Amino acid sequence: MDPELPFLTIGEMGMLRDIYLKDGHTVIVLTPTYSGCPATDIISKDSLKAARVVDPNAEVEISLRPAWTTDWISEETRLKMTENGISPPIGESHDRAFLTGDGKVVPCPLCKSKNTKMVSAFGSTACKASFTCLDCMEPFEHFKCI
């Protein structure tokens, strides 16, 4: 599971890039959401622990190329984010305005209103921004396009 979004797996987030056999043991290839992601160590350890149930010699490889992108998050996963109160990434990663939320309408995942306001470009993690819905008055986080 993703430690920062525990209702999603690392596969659903697009961080599980590959699993292959090398010299008779399993190699899990992970790409963190960004190179300085503090959850990378936890994700690596959890993945290794799970893999070693099947293969005691399994290893984890961290790959930073290609860089992770929110484009790897499926529509089904985005729906799960919304169902769990997180506004999913909107658009594609090449539109840098989505990184800051400037000029972008971010709907409230709770009441679906488009009358929202960014409170802070950074939320509980660097990849999320804090918003408030001006209709239902509830705070929520928006997962930025990266």
Image (cartoon, rainbow, N blue to C red):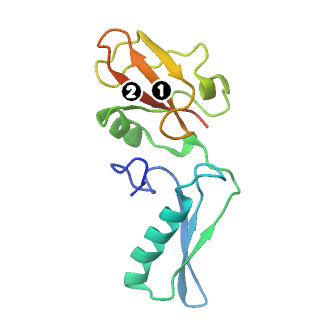
Q: Nearer the viewer, residue 126 or 110?
A: 126
Mark 2 residue type: Phe
Where is the C terminus found, in terms of image quarters? top right
- Residue at 51% x, 88% y is 57
Judge whether 20 appears above or below 6 on screen.
below
CA separation, marks 1 and 2?
A: 6 Å
Q: Quadrant of residue 53?
A: bottom left
For disc 2, the marked residue is 140
Image disc number at residue 16: none
The picture places residue 36, in percent across and down from the top left corner, at: 65, 52
Mark 1 residue type: Ser
Q: Is tag 1's residue or tag 2's residue first in the polypeptide sequence? A: 1
For disc 1, the marked residue is 130
User: Do the residues under discs 1 and 2 have CB atoms within 8 angstroms?
Assistant: yes
Structural crowding at the residue carrying mark 1, measured as other residues with C-alpha within 10 Å and reported as few (<14), some (14–19) or many (≥20): many
Where is the N terminus found, in terms of image quarters? bottom left
- Relative to 5, 100 lies left or right: right
The picture places residue 22, in percent across and down from the top left corner, at: 60, 84
Q: Quadrant of residue 60?
A: bottom right
Label 1: which secondary element: strand
Judge whether 54 appears above or below 93 on screen.
below
The picture places residue 119, in percent across and down from the top left corner, at: 50, 19
- Relative to 88, 101 lies left or right: right
Structural crowding at the residue carrying mark 2, measured as other residues with C-alpha within 10 Å and reported as few (<14), some (14–19) or many (≥20): many
- Residue at 35% x, 36% y is 79
The picture places residue 113, in percent across and down from the top left corner, at: 35, 13
